[in-house]
Amino acid sequence: MHSSSTARRRGVFGVGVAITLLVSLASGPALAQQKSTSAQGKPKPAAAAPAPAQDPKLVEAERLFVEAKRLMNEMRVSEACRAFEESQKLDPAVGTQFNIADCLEREGRIATAYRQFSDLHDVLARVGDDRAPQAEARARALEPKLPRITIRIPWSKSVSGLVVMRDGETVEHSMLGTSVPVDPGAHKIVVQATNKKDYAVTVNAALGKADVVDVPALADVERQVVVRNTGVSQRNIGLVVAGVGVAAVGTSVVLGFVAKGNYDGAVEGCTDLGDRYQCPPGNRSGDAASAQSMGTVATIVGGIGAVAIVTGGVLWFTAPKGAKTPEKQSARIDVVPVFDTQRAGLMLSGTL
């Protein structure tokens, strides 16, 4: 059984008849020789040679082939096709390929069957096998039934990175504009290109129908431009500047009072001459000059504070509309006045 099944897989037809004929032709001389030898002394029969070990792959290929034939007889076509294909992978043979093509046609995948019959014809014709016309005839019989899809992209050379896929498989650019046979059913076509939006369409292929897909020019990918909301930042800065201004004005007031107190203490007991004071010996006349310097600083700081308050207000009110101040302000600033008898100023610290 094994040898005859292998012959069917490999498409070797008529071998059994030839072997039978050869055995028949050889039986006469052999029988005569046997009788002659028997008359001379009846020699012992020769021991049978051990059967050669069989390749496990070939054994499995044969088993799958037989299983596929059984499934076909039971009309379990899809299962039979898979078994034929597995057998062909293990041990390629023209007979198995012919059965695969026939099975695919019965399964309804006529475009795939058409390609199988066409490939089989090419293989057989190349070696001069007289079964090539049979494979060609089966392929031609399917041609009028084939669904076909043509993908046309006239602008294909104007973009970079063009990728065309049908059912997840890449379509070669050379096949664009060519009518390609497909199996009946839904086929998804996706077109992609660099910096372009994808285009996708589904075509429902039917027996004998030719569909044409004209792919429109792909739209540009919208570049996301990040626009920062400067309104919030500007208001934060305005708050900080105004805060500095308020602190500066407050410091100016404090410095003014301190400077006034120091000055009054320095000129106590002195005679006011209009443009200056005349103080008795030992009086702290130097403290009066220091107090005057502190008063000047207080005036300057106060002026700066006023300008800062105005500037902060301008920043706040001119911030872009629609900007809302965050619930939690991250900007913080601390203002600490620093002064003594020799100097006066502000120390700022914080974060924006």
Image (cartoon, rainbow, N blue to C red):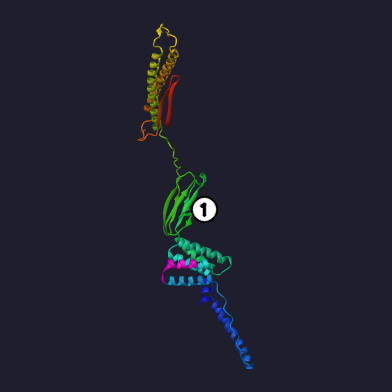
Above or below, 232 against 264 in this view is below
Q: Position of residue 281 (x, y in %)?
A: 44, 9
The residue lying toward the viewer, choosing from 76 and 89, is 89
Count numbered badges in the picture. 1
Instruction: Check residue 263 for magenta coloring.
Output: no
Q: Is residue 10 visible?
A: no
Above or below, 313 against 67 in this view is above
Q: Is residue 48 left or right of residue 217?
A: right
The residue lying toward the viewer, choosing from 23 and 352, is 352
Q: Amino acid at mark 1?
A: Glu
Q: Position of residue 258 (x, y in %)?
A: 39, 18
Q: Quadrant of the C terminus?
A: top left
Above or below, 71 against 264 in this view is below
Q: Is residue 112 visible?
A: yes
The residue located at (46%, 56%) in the rendering is 148
Q: Which residue is mark 1?
A: 172
Q: Residue furthest top?
A: 273
The part of the image, by quadrant, that contains residue 316 is top left
The part of the image, by quadrant, that contains residue 246 is top left
Q: Position of residue 219 (x, y in %)?
A: 45, 43
The residue lying toward the viewer, choosing from 103 and 264, is 264
Q: Residue furthest front?
A: 282
Q: Is residue 255 left or right of residue 46?
A: left
The residue located at (55%, 64%) in the rendering is 122
Q: Dot 1 surroundings within 10 Å: few (below 14), some, or many (20 or more)?
A: few
Secondary structure beneath disc 1?
loop
The residue lying toward the viewer, choosing from 214 and 185, is 185
Which stretch appears magenta? 74-86
Q: Is residue 60 left or right of residue 238?
A: right
Q: Position of residue 15 (x, y in %)?
A: 55, 76
**Secondary structure character of the magenta stretch overall:** helix
